[in-house]
Amino acid sequence: MRNERLHEGNRLSLPVPAGTASSAPVLVFGIPGVTATKEGEGGNIAGRATVWTEGVFDVSTPDAVGAEGTPIYITAANALTVTAAGNTLFGRTVADADGAGGTKAAGAGTVHVRLAKV
C-alpha cells in the first residue's frame, strides 16, 4: 500500500521506563508487549526499546496459575499478576503441544502468555 509505514507493526520502537531490560513486560499507550531490546539499545534512542506487541512469551508471575487460558494482568509498575482490579489485561496463558507452560504453582516461575490484542 502506498501509505503503509510498517507492514506487520508487531515490533515497534516505543517509549519505556529508564533501565528497562530486554524480555521485560511493558504496557505502552495501552498496548501490552515484551521488550526485544534493552532501553536505549538496538538502534533505539535513550528512553525507547524495541517491543514485540504480538506473540507468545515466557513471562514471570509470582501468582499461581491454575488453568490454561487464565488472564494475566499488568500493573502500572509493569509487574504481572492474576489480579484484575486496577490492572490492564496483558494476555492469557497457553500451553505447548505437550501441555506444558499454561499453568504453574504459586511462587516464582514462568508461564507462556499470548499477548492480548487491543
Image (cartoon, rainbow, N blue to C red):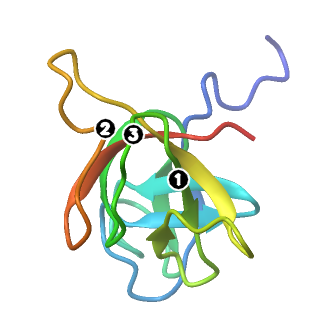
Q: From the image, tell me which residue sits under label 1.
A: 33
| Vertical order, 60 against 18 (above or below) | above
Query: Label 2 is placed on what type of residue?
Result: Gly
Q: Earlier in the sequence, mark 1 or mark 2?
A: 1
Q: Is residue 21 left or right of residue 89?
A: left
Q: For the residues carrying marks 1 and 3, which lies nearer the camera in this image?
A: 3
Q: Which residue does the image show at 58% across and 53% down from the upper left? A: 90
Q: Count the labels in the image.
A: 3
Question: Which one is in front, 12 or 62?
Answer: 62
Q: Secondary structure at mark 2?
A: loop
In contact (CB < 8 Å): disc 2 and disc 3: yes
Q: Which residue does the image show at 32% across and 74% down from the upper left? A: 21
Q: Earlier in the sequence, mark 1 or mark 3?
A: 1
List x then y, in percent, for residue 83: 58, 68
Residue closest to the far bottom: 18
List x then y, in percent, for residue 115: 53, 41
Q: Quadrant of residue 8?
A: top right
